[in-house]
Each structure stands twice: as structure tokens, then as C-alpha cells.
Amino acid sequence: MKGLIFSVKRYSIHDGPGIRVTFFMKGCPLSCWWCHNPEGISPDQETVEQIEKVGEMEFRKTEEAGRFYSVNDILEILDKERIFISYSKGGITFSGGEPMLQMDFLSEALKVCKANGYHTAVDTSGYSSTDNFKTIIPFTDLFLFDIKHLNDNLHNEYTGVSNMLVLENLRLLLSSGRDIMIRIPVIPGINDDDDHLESLREFIMNNKNENLKKINLLPYHKIGSSKYKKFNIPYRMSDAQQPSRQRMNELKMFFSETGIKVKIGG
Ligand code: SF4
């Protein structure tokens, strides 16, 4: 069995505790307007053409988005970093895309990594069947769980799917005994109005328990925008401005009132 992965990030410090290796898996059932990883949306291996300019000259080259890895390949990569991972109390994180779209591979990889002593984390949109979540809970130490919008109509408009399953899965995970970090992308003009932020804070207050360890506020940024052209996907956020540092600090204070630790960034 192999998993299709479009990027492997070693020495990652934003995807869970300690130093981690993060595997970004191909395929996502959502199509968020602000997605930073458009190369992760298609579940297929893609060949893209890149044009590089040197002065007046143009050079075309092709590159593969996505490579197949076996669970053993993953373990080999981890074992090379074991000393850093273990010293920093880090581990492995599966991100994407939506890692649960490759459920069989994900579940096997989590099981094997855990059996080999690694702390395991899954960074998820929450949009997968509840049964899938129940399958991986025993092998997952930490869930990094996105909440993008509480209004179902707006969630549908900006991500392409309903939030009902997402919120149901969040409640399931909060009662699972596993650690949870809620990730809130802060997207100007989409989910950062006062009314929505108020309801989000209230939602967290009403649902929090000892398993909810942290809230990560992820400021919108334009870093991924240049990739859209390459993957032939329209970019719908051209007019959006990145939230200022001051605004992010205000939001940090605002969400700290939940009593949960808040961090800006992953
Ligand atoms: S859930 Fe994440 S990976 Fe999927 S489209 Fe949205 S931002 Fe991109």
C-alpha cells in the first residue's frame, strides 16, 4: 500500500509539539478560497510545467506534484531524524490536502509509527466520515482541527462543503480523550467579522474540555497565490490584505478569554 504525498517537511516546528516531520498528502474534498497548498487539492499525481526567466530567455521544465511513499519509506525518513524528534519530544504529522482522503494508508502509517514509538498528529479539515475518525483515534495522539466558519451557508460558499460533519467530528474528538488543537484561519472579509468571532469564541467556550490544549490563529497570507496559475486553479483572494500583527494580537487577546492557550501561527 502506498500514499501519495506532495511534500515532506523535516524539522517542522509548527505542526504539533517539538521537532516533527510533516507529510503533506494529496487530495482534499474542500476547495477553500484561501488555500495555501493548491497543489494538494487534486487527489492525482500531476505534472506541471514551470517557466523560469533568465533575462530575455525562458526555460521550461516539468515537475511532478506528488510521489508515492510506502509506510516503510515514511519510517525510514523518521528514523533518520529520530534523535531530533526524541530530544525535542516531537513526532510525525500528516497534513495535506486532507490526509483522511487516503484513509487506508493513513491508518496503517499511524499504526506503524505509533508502534515504533513516535508521537502522531493529524492535521485535518474535519471533513471525513465519523467512522474514519473512530478508526484512527487509537493511533493518533493529537488532532490539529480546523474551524473555518460556523455559518453553514458561508462555509459552503467559501470551502465548497457543509460544516455539519466537521462540527460533529470535532465534538467526537473532544470526547475521545485525545489532545486537540483548534486551528482558525483568519481570513479577511470571510470569517473575521465581529459577529462571527463572537460566535466562534462562544462555540469554543461551550464545547471546550481538558482535551482542548490550544487555539492556533493562522493569519491569511498570500504565499501560496503564485502556485495557482501553475495548477490552473483560479485565485479568488487577489484583493485580500494580510491581517496586521496588531490585529492578530487583538484576536489573540480576544480568544484567550476562553481560558485556552492561544498562539498566532501553527
Ligand atoms: S481544507 Fe486545507 S488543504 Fe483543503 S482546500 Fe481547504 S485550506 Fe486547502
Image (cartoon, rainbow, N blue to C red):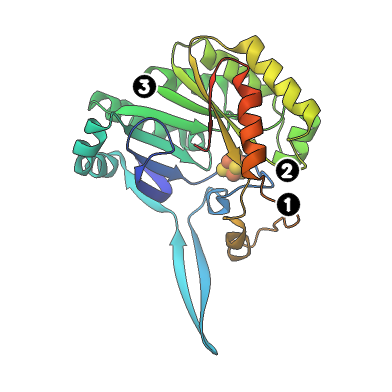
Q: CB of mark 2 within 8 Å of CB of mark 1?
A: yes
Q: Amino acid at mark 2?
A: Pro
Front one among 162 and 243: 243
Q: Secondary structure at mark 1?
A: loop
Q: Could you tell me residue 156's position as x and y percent?
A: 75, 35
**10 Å neighbourhood of mark 2: few (<14), some, or many (≥20)?**
some
- Residue 166, visible in the rendered structure: no
Kindly check if marks 3 and 1 are in contact, taking CB atoms under 8 A apart as contact. Answer: no
Asked if the beta carbon under badge 1 is closer than 8 A to the nearest atom of ligand 1, the reply is no
Residue 84 placement, left or right of 19: left
- Closer to the chain start, of discs 2 and 1, is 2
Q: Residues within 10 Å of mark 3 (few under 14, many from 20)?
A: many
Drawn side of residue 209 relative to residue 158, left or right: left
Q: Nearer the viewer, residue 259 or 13?
A: 259
Measure the C-alpha gap from mark 3 to mark 1.
Answer: 39 Å
At x 32%, y 37%, the residue is 19
Where is residue 246? Give x, y as percent: 64, 40
Residue at disc 3, secondary structure: helix
What's the amino acid at mark 1? Ala
Image position, residue 64 (x, y; %):
44, 62
Question: Which is in the foreground here, disc 3 or disc 1?
Answer: 1
- Residue 139: which numbered mark, if any? 3
Q: Earlier in the sequence, mark 2 or mark 3?
A: 3
User: What is the CA distance from the residue labelled 2 to the residue labelled 3?
Assistant: 36 Å
Distance in Å between CA atoms under marks 2 and 1: 6 Å
Q: Which residue is mark 1?
A: 240
Q: Amino acid at mark 3?
A: Phe
Label 2 sits on residue? 188
